[in-house]
Image (spheres, rainbow, N blue to C red):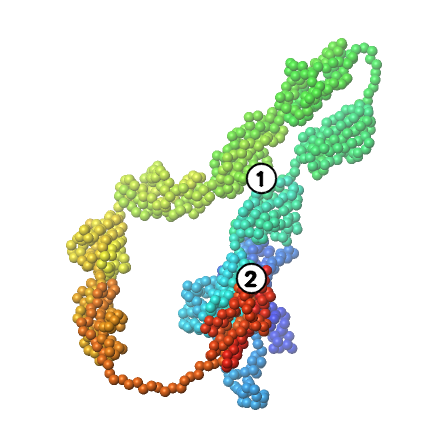
Amino acid sequence: MPEPKPAAKKAPKNKDADKPAPKEEPPQEAPTEPPKEEAPPEEQTPTTEEPTGIFLKRPESVSVENGNDVVIVAQVNGKELPGKPTITWFKGKWLELGIKSGARFSFKETHDPANNVYNVELQIKKVVLGDRGDYRLEVKAKDMCDSCSFNIDVEAPSQDASGQSLESFKRSGEGKSEDAGELDFSGLLKKREVVEQEKKKKKDDDDLGIPPEIWELLKGAKKSEYERIAFQYGITDLRGMLKRLKKAKVEVKKSEAFTKKLDPAYQVDRGNKIKLMVEISDPDLPLKWFKNGQEIKPSSKYVFENVGKKRILTINKCTMADDAAYEVAVADEKCFTELFVKEPPVLIVTPLEDQQVFVGDRVEMVVEVSEDGAQVMWSKDGVEMTREDSYKARYRFKKDGRRHLLIFSEVTLEDSGRYQVMTNGGQSEADLIVEEKQLEVLQDIADLTVRASDQAVFKCEVSDEKVTGKWYRNGVEVRPSKRITISHVGRFHKLVIDDVRPEDEGDYTFVPDGYALSLSAKLNFLEIKVEYVPKQEPPKIHLDCSGKTSENSILVVAGNKLRLDVAITGEPPPVATWLKGDEVFSATEGRTRIEQRVDCSSFVIESAERADEGRYTIKVTNPAGEDVASIFLRVVDVPDPPEAVRVTSVGEDWAILVWEPPKYDGGQPVTGYLMERKKKGSHRWMKLNFEVFPETTYESTRMIEGVLYEMRVFAVNAIGVSQPSVNTKPFMPIAPTSEPQHLTVEDVTDTTTTLKWRPPNRIGAGGIDGYLVEYCLEDSEDWVPANTEPVERCGFTVKNLPTGARIMFRVVGVNIAGRSEPAILAQPVTIQEIVEQPKIRLPRHLRQTYIRRVGEPINLLIPFQGKPRPQVVWTKGGVPVDPSRVNLRTSDTDTVFFVRQAARSDSGEYELCVQIENMKDTATICISVVEKAGPPINVTVKEVWGTNALVEWQPPKDDGNSEVTGYLIQKADKKTMEWFTVYERSRHTHCTVADLIVGNEYYFRVFSENVCGLSESPGVSKTTARILKSDISLKPFEYKQHDFRTPPKFLTPLTDRVVVAGYSAALNCAVRGEPKPKVVWMKNKMEIREDPKFLSTNFQGILTLNIRRPSPFDSGTYSCLAVNELGEALAECKLEVRVPN
């Protein structure tokens, strides 16, 4: 315990006694002197040590009065800790105070971020005597741990010492004036003696720091309850406590009021009910129940019951508020107990699920528990998440019945991590992956060349239909007007310019909001100059392949729109014809069509497909000639999904995923793969890689053993990501067990070896199917299996081994995941029988005479040891036992001696011999088979005098092979011949029978008794004892007749009652009087007459008034009037009828 404890006990006993005095305040004995010149006494000012370790301020020991509040404060240096600390308060060495939170114990923890200091506080409201003792504060932060101890001393409320002395120092004589009578010094002397005894008792109790109330509790408890009481009240020195109890040898003072007290402590689960019961010596004594010092009133919550001398308090539907100290007071005596309300374990019904979201999304992580309003703790990457930090981290907690939610309004990249929710009955984990939003451009805007008064349309398509954006011309934002229209429909963004003018020419750019991305195109204004050409021109194809990969080759992404505008010239205007391969294509409507204009021919594909790939030819003709051009259209697409996706092997938290490349790569080489996994039954997939993975074998890690998973793979090329592959079959990460433990050799013979071992330390979710045993010669490495099928027990005998060989053995555990690491014997085993000297292990009960009754079976099991198997021989008197009477069975380790029905002839000494070659061991077993003894002989009446008779007999001829332990003597009157026992277990062969009736004649009989009981038949006396009459005269005694008449008097008065409406009630009392009094029942001083609701009974003075199904109108004052000719008596009580809520 800490040093300041003695000083804490001498703190002033007032309301502020639990607060430490300021260090600058001088002692009260010398207020005029400065505090620097005179140091305070050691008894009053404890020496404070400099704080070391992680504590800036350690908790101080305090002394507090019973019923007051106490606050313990400490400070922890956060600079010395690697993370946020976990604060735990203990009473004694093991009892954690956190289970009492919310009752009288409250905890507070604050953090000063400027100085990185944690302030912790423990508050105990209305302390009781059971709170005194040693306490401990423990601080943990990752791998750091530190603790410090302090003491709380609870004392009785202080009184004015002078007032006690003056009250004790008073004059004798009641009802006299203050000056009358003599001074009474005895009261003061007794008080001083009591004070001295209390000081001495307190000094003795301070030896171990254990309160006297707990000593009294220990003295009255059983030895088996010492450890529980020590754990409950924080007693750490168990050896000192036991020595003190052994040294005391004080008898427990019997309580005058209680015949049975409350147990030291009770425990109940929250929501259940509990009964506290005491038994009092006098049922008329008043009794009161208290909770934390406050009297308990009857209600639907607290129900009082009186059953004889038992008084029962029933607490219904216990809550954490009922976790308190209870006491019951009867007269001047009290007994205490403490009730602990235990929270039932909160189980997780629906666990967390992994989630993959984008920055800015709303996220709800939901878990469902088994109890409404249960407390759960959220943590991220092992760090607890609190409401104080929620404002900085932009998250909040929500409770919806049994559902608990962790909500992020807008997640950020910092919110990624592994989240865990914990209850007192389980936990669940899940990963939250946050990614940056990536906007994909599905269709870029293209350069336009338009003529005056034409319409210019810029169009683009992006992947997110919610994305907005702005249009710019030469860096200046374009605003809508009568000629300019800006539209946003789904994923398409359009800029339409009607009646194009020369000033509209320039660079146009579309910038999506929130993304570092821009799409640009150029608008070229075409001026039309009309010239007259009087001569013809041959047709000419002006082909421009934008995005071409080779000469006259165009690459288009599947699903995109392709518009191939081919400018043609010639005079007169030529006629254009399109061919796909060798077939003429002339459709002007549909997905694939041709659009003709005077100077341009356009080939349009709305949504390109793989079938559109091929060579296209345009042929233009006019009277002046013709021109031909070929274009090869190549359609590229995302690849097909990967094939043959499967899991080839699994481990404790990993799995190997293998797949085949897709058959069709989409026209572009596959650059890599993306993998996803999910728990079976869940709908949330979690990405395993963010950068494309080039191989076709992937190892997935950080999985939970025993949980079913599924995986799928995406193929990636320059165009995009394929559809997902078929999900793998559900698989479970399971690892083999660890190696078996403590492999040892149990037995060795010339051809066998018996091995035994213990199960592996780690078995895992796959369980264990059994064990395989293998062996090999000392210089060989070829292991031979000893068993083909796994054995379930931790032991095996390897047979058919070569004699004399030195062999190594090993054992492996097998489960669904495969074989474990082997457990190998450190040394080879020599296959050779070990000679062990024979030894008989005779049971303790056979080391003395073994007694059985006639007809009972004799079954003796005697173990022995010895190798090789010894030879066992049973003999009786040097002759082998008769096999017709005795059945013998012998194994390698024991022998059985069995007789089905014992007879007297089976008695005797039997010798057991266990022999191996010239070594042997013997044991002698003495068996005695007994039965009931015969009757005594020669029972005679030797002498008769007065009302006495002397009876003698001789022992029985047959004692039943057992000593006669006594005799039973009975007598019978000759007239009735009814037998009555006179003596039992008489050791002598004679007895004197007294108090016989004069004038009667008696027979006597005697039974003999041994270990089997009384003899079957008695020995009966042949002669009788005759008691003769003598002259006796009776002189009558003269006495005065007693007057038994008494006025009525109530022996048991009426008691106040509180009953529940609708349930029958009864008022009871007892009255005595002679002659028998007349009884009248009244309610509110009005006689109760012929009312069917009331029924009164009088049974031998016990009066009962039964009230059938009372209502609140039946409340009032009930009285019972008893009247006879000598007087009358009245008893009253109050009845309150309550309506249940």
Instruction: Return the residue nearer the eye: 103 or 431.
Output: 103
Image point (75%, 33%), residue name: 487
Q: Position of residue 678 (x, y in %)?
A: 55, 39
Would residue 851 appear left or right of 692 to someone viewing this image? Answer: left
Image point (41%, 85%), residue name: 1041
Instruction: Return the residue nearer the eye: 89 or 29.
Output: 89
Q: Nearer the viewer, mark 2 or mark 1?
A: 2
Query: Mark 1 Cα within 10 Å, few/some/many (few <14, many 20+)?
Result: some
Residue 1116 seen in the current view: yes
Q: Are marks 2 and 1 in contact (CB under 8 Å)?
A: no
Outermost residue, front direction? 1090
Image point (26%, 57%), residue name: 842
Q: CA distance from mark 2 to mark 1?
A: 58 Å
Query: Mark 2 Cα within 10 Å, few/some/many (few <14, many 20+)?
Result: some
Residue matched to label 1 = 684
Would residue 978 appear left or right of 685 to someone viewing this image? Answer: left
Q: Earlier in the sequence, mark 2 or mark 1?
A: 1
Q: Position of residue 780 (x, y in %)?
A: 33, 38
Query: What amino acid is found at the position of numbered circle 2 in the picture?
Result: Gly
- Relative to 524, is 287 above or below? below
Q: Based on the displayed image, in which of its 4 quarters is residue 929 positioned?
A: bottom left
Q: Secondary structure at mark 2?
A: loop
Q: Position of residue 848 (x, y in %)?
A: 24, 61
Image point (55%, 65%), residue name: 1093
- Relative to 134, is 703 above or below? above
Total labels: the figure holds: 2
Where, quadrant-wise, is the C terminus in this rendering?
Answer: bottom right
Query: What amino acid is found at the position of numbered circle 1 in the picture?
Result: Arg
Q: Position of residue 672 (x, y in %)?
A: 57, 31
Residue 212 seen in the current view: no
Residue matched to label 2 = 1062
Instruction: Return the residue nearer the eye: 655 or 496.
Output: 496
